[in-house]
Amino acid sequence: MARFTSGDSVTVRRAFPPGHVRTPYYIRGKSGHVERVLDSFANPEELAYGRDGLPKRPLYRVRFAQSRVWPDYSGAPGDTLDVELYEHWLEPAGEESA
Amino acid sequence: MTLRSDGNVLDHYQAMELAVSALLIDKGYFTEDDMAAEIDAMAKRTPEIGARVVAQAWTDPDFKARLLEDGTGACESIGLDMGPTRLMVVESTADVHNVIVCTLCSCFPRMLMGIPPDWYKSKDYRSRVVREPRVVLKEFGTEPGADVDVRVHDNSADMRYLVLPKRPDGTDGMSREELAKLVTRDSMIGVKIVEAP
């Protein structure tokens, strides 16, 4: 069961675990909103080590305003960035400990 | 065994790839023939497959709706083999210009476009298109207006992305086959638009 639904504001955990992770470095600590709940998938961060990756993890497409990702963003104000993120990387926006 | 044309010294990953594939063959997971067949099958997939999907979406509103809702299912419904990965199709319009990247590696909708171009895998493209997409697009000759939202898709996990480019004006009378010929690999990545003939 997915914890977040479409439209929810979320913040990407500012975590730096070693090894194989699927959350790009540049997006950690940034806030956006859930554009779409994708399916659940075996966790690739476990599969990478030969484990079964279960239970499956919900995957989200999270949309970020470029101006909130890059403080010096030089494009247009409506420009956005969509990133696929697993649920264990997301927190409700506002609960992030900086 | 495989010979490298680009110099005599293998780098770390090339040596590892040769060692791992030799081990897998020795242990009977697959044969050298299986590997050659897979490489052949990969080489046979070309952007023409994706172009046919785009042309069908432009000319068949029901198919387009299904494609945007469930890319994998829509493609399978017209007989395409989508393999294990899942497809998400994003539509470029007069208001939104989409472009895809995989910042972590080189995820690419291979089932519809084959092997990605070298520049798509380059650190330069992967690091810059998320940070300064309009600058990168301009280098490809694409300049969306300030009233168009540029939407970058980082396909770093389990979905693969395909851009459904905007159908060019002045193509109303064209057949699906004629339209498919206009659709390029770069337009389905989103670094270029589809031009009217």
Image (cartoon, coloured by chain):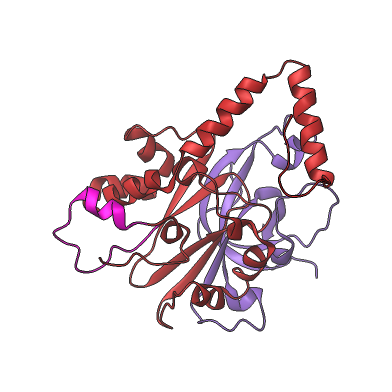
Chain colours: A purple, B red
Residue B165 inside the magenta-drawn segment: yes
Q: Position of residue A23 (x, y in %)?
A: 70, 55
Residue found at x 30% / y 53%:
B181
In the rendered view of the protein, which quadrant contains the N terminus of chain A?
top right
Q: Quadrant of residue B79?
A: top left
Which quadrant holds residue B123?
Answer: bottom right
Residue B1 is a magenta residue:
no
Q: Is residue B75 left or right of residue A56?
A: left
Task: Please give the name of the residue rendered at 83% of the width and 58% of the height, measured from the top-left corner.
Answer: A16
Counting from the top left corner in percent of width and height, residue B113 is at: 46, 46
Q: Main secondary structure of the magenta part?
A: loop
Camera sees residue B107: yes
Above-or-below relation of B67 to B28: below
Residue at the image position 38 percent from the left and 46 percent from the top = B48
Q: Position of residue B160 (x, y in %)?
A: 53, 47
Which is nearer the eye, B148 or B192? B192
Q: Is residue B60 visible?
A: no
Along the line of sight, which residue is nearer the eye, B13 or A61? B13
- Residue numbers of the magenta segment: B164-183
Residue nearest the viewer, comparing B35 with A87: B35
- The residue depicted at 41 percent of the width and 77 percent of the height is B148
